[in-house]
Amino acid sequence: MKKEFTEIVGGTEIRYVLDEATGTYLPDWELPEQRELGRYGRMRAEFLKENHKGLYQAMLIKGTLNDHCAEVEDIAYERLDRIVKAMAKADGLTEEMKNSDPLHWAGMMNNYKSCAEEIILSELIYV
């Protein structure tokens, strides 16, 4: 039995290698380096996997899933920061308040972050 063979599919040359454990030929593909995803990137990937199986499979096969999720994650963190700062500014919450009334400041910042996360989840992750 041959250890490998090459086939041309749709003008693209694909090399297949024998997997001796299973006795099947598998494509010898090299994936580009993958960025490790954080919270929002993993949430986006999981959402696509559970709710948009076709899109998830297509992106996985093309090798674009990680890039897509990484981009969504970057946008999510930028928006989170921007929204929290805008809410704090609108309510007049300042860094001086952090020293004078830390419990109030922390409570308000946690509230802003929770609100911003709800916006991000509904607009970026679960669409």
Image (cartoon, rainbow, N blue to C red):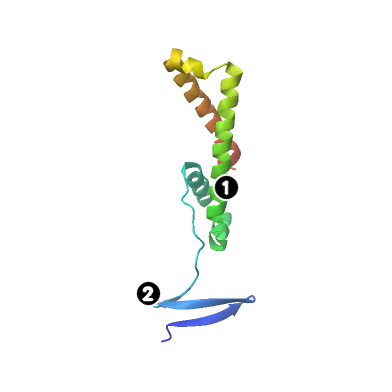
* Separation of residues labelled 1 and 2 (CA atoms): 36 Å
**Residue at the image position 49 percent from the left and 23 percent from the top:** 109
The quadrant holding residue 24 is bottom left
Residue positioned most to the right? 11
The residue singled out by tag 2 in the image is: 22
The answer to whether mark 1 and mark 2 are in CB contact below 8 A is no
Q: Position of residue 110 (x, y in %)?
A: 47, 25
Label disc, if present, on residue 94 of the rendered structure: none
10 Å crowding of disc 2: few (<14), some (14-19), many (20+): few
**Residue at the image position 47 percent from the left and 44 percent from the top:** 38
Q: Is residue 52 visible?
A: no
Is residue 83 positioned above or below 127 on the image?
A: above
Q: Position of residue 59 (x, y in %)?
A: 57, 58
Q: Is residue 99 visible?
A: yes
Is residue 8 positioned above or below 100 on the image?
A: below
Q: Nearer the viewer, residue 123 or 104?
A: 104
The residue singled out by tag 1 in the image is: 71
- Amino acid type at image mark 2: Thr
10 Å crowding of disc 1: few (<14), some (14-19), many (20+): some
- Amino acid type at image mark 1: Glu
